[in-house]
Image (cartoon, rainbow, N blue to C red):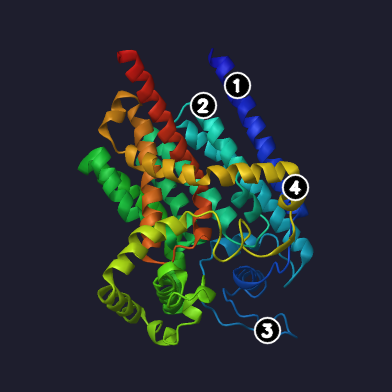
Amino acid sequence: MKKYSSHTTLLLLGIILTLGFYLRIKSVGETEVIAPLSKDAKLYYTYAYNLRYKHTYSMQTGKSADLDSAVKPDSLCSPGYPLFLTLFIDSRSDKNALNRIYLSQAILSTLTLLFAFLFYKSFMPQYWSAATSVLLALSPHLIVANSYILTETLFCFFLVLAGWGTGKFIQNPSFKIAAILGIILGTTNLIRPSLQYFPVVLSFFLLINFGAKKGSHLFWGILLGFTLISAPWFIRNVISVKGESNRKLMINFLHHGMYPDFMYDGKSGTYGFPYRYDPRADEINKDIPSVLNEISTRFLRNPSKYLLWYLVKKPIIFWSWNLIQGRDVFVYPVSASPYFYNKFFQWTHFLMYTFHGGIVFFCLFGSVMSWFPFLQNYLPHSSILIARFASLLIIYFILIHIIGAPFPRYSIPLRPYLYGLAAFFLHILILVFKKFRKDH
C-alpha cells in the first residue's frame, strides 16, 4: 500500500510539473513585452549590471558613452533579485540575456510547483495537495510573471520554500532547522523587504505553540538565520548610504496608499497614481512624520471614509484580479501572448478568473478556521500548526498592505498560500460534514 501511495504521488507530481512547465515555457516563448526594461524592470536590470560590471550597487546608468563610468551607491531596492539577475546578464540591454532570464524564471516557477505540492502535503491529504497544485500550475498571474524582469517569480519561490521549510520545522522543531528556516526567510526578505517584521510576529506563534522555554529557543534560531542573511545588507546601507533610501521606500509605501480608491480627490483620471496629481505631494513626501501627520489629519477630517478605505477596500483591492498598474494579468503591456489566441490558455484564464473571488473568500475563512480548537478532532497537531503558519503569513501581508499601498501586483507571489488555505477550508468543511452525517 505504501509503495502504491509513493507511485501515485510521483505520478500526480509528474503530471502537475509537466502541465506547469508546458504553460510556463510556452508563455515565455510567445509573450512579447513591448518595453521589457521600463520602470521597475529597468531599475532591477541596472542594479544587476552595475553590481556585476562596476562592483557597485547603484541605480545610476553612468555616462552613456562609457559603460565603465563610476556610479554612486544607493539602496532604492533590495538586492535579492538584482543578485539573481547577475547570473544572466552580459550587457546593458541584451535580448539574449532577457531570454535567459525568462527561461530561468519559467524553470524556477515550475520548481515552485514542486515545493508547493510538498508544502500542501504537510497539512492536507495527497489528493487535496495535488488539486491545489493544479490551481497553482494554471494561475495566469504566476505564468505571465515569468516574462517580466520583476521580483514576483523569485519572491514566490522563496515564500513557498519557506512554507515547505516550516513543514519540516514543525515536524522536527530543533534549533538547527529553525536557523535554516530563518535563512530562507531572510533571503526572501532580501528579495522584497516586506518580511522584515515577520520574525517578530513569528515569535508569538512559537511562544504560544511551544511554550516559553522551547519557543524562545526556537525563535533565537530563526532570528540567527534571518540576521545572518540580513545583517550584511543593513551594515552596508548604514555605512554607504546612511539608510536614506530605506526611509524613502517606507515614505512612498505609506504615501501611495493614503488616497481612497487610489484616486486623487475622487477623480477617475488619477486612478492608480493619485500621488502624481497631488499638488502637495512633495510636502507630504518629505519625511515619515510628514506623511503620518497627513494621514492622521485626513482621518480626523473624514473618519468614516478613511476607515472604509483602510479596513475594507484596501484588502479587497489587494486581492483583486486586475492589476492597477497594468491590465488584467499583465503588469506591463505586451504585443503578443498565448492568452490572446491559444484556446487552452484562454480556457484556463477563464476558469481561474471565474473562481478567483470564491478562492479569496475561502482563503480568508480558511485563515480564520485554522485557529479554531475543534480542528484537533480532525487533524494531527503538526498539520494544524503548518496551516496556522500559512494563515499567519496571509494575515501579516494583509495588515502590511492595509498600512501602505495595496497594489494587487504585490499579492501575486502569495497565490500558493491563497490556494492552499482555500483548499484547506474546503477540506475541513467536508470532514465536518462527513462527521455530522455519521453522527446523525
Residue 72, x across and y down, in percent: 56, 82
Assess whether mark 2 and mark 4 are in contact (beta carbons under 8 angstroms): no
> Could you tell me which secondary element the residue under label 3 belongs to?
loop
Could you tell me which quadrant the C terminus lies in? top left
> Could you tell me which secondary element the residue under label 2 belongs to?
helix
Q: Earlier in the sequence, mark 1 or mark 3?
A: 1
What residue appears at the point 59 percent right and 75 percent down from the top-left corner?
56
Residue on which disc 4 sits: 26
Residue 83, x across and y down, in percent: 59, 62
What residue appears at the point 40 percent right and 66 percent down from the top-left corner?
404
Residue on which disc 2 sits: 126
> Could you tell me which secondary element the residue under label 4 belongs to?
helix
Q: Amino acid at mark 1?
A: Thr
Task: Name the one closer to the observer, 249 or 226.
Answer: 249
Q: CA distance from mark 1 to mark 3?
A: 57 Å
Q: Earlier in the sequence, mark 3 or mark 4?
A: 4
Q: Residue furthest top?
A: 1
Mark linked to residue 69: 3
- Quarter of the view holding residue 134: top right
Mark linked to residue 152: none
Is 328 rendered above or below residue 288? above
Residue on which disc 1 sits: 8
Q: Residue furthest left?
A: 212
Q: Residues within 10 Å of mark 2 (few under 14, many from 20)?
A: some
Is 396 rendered above or below residue 242? above
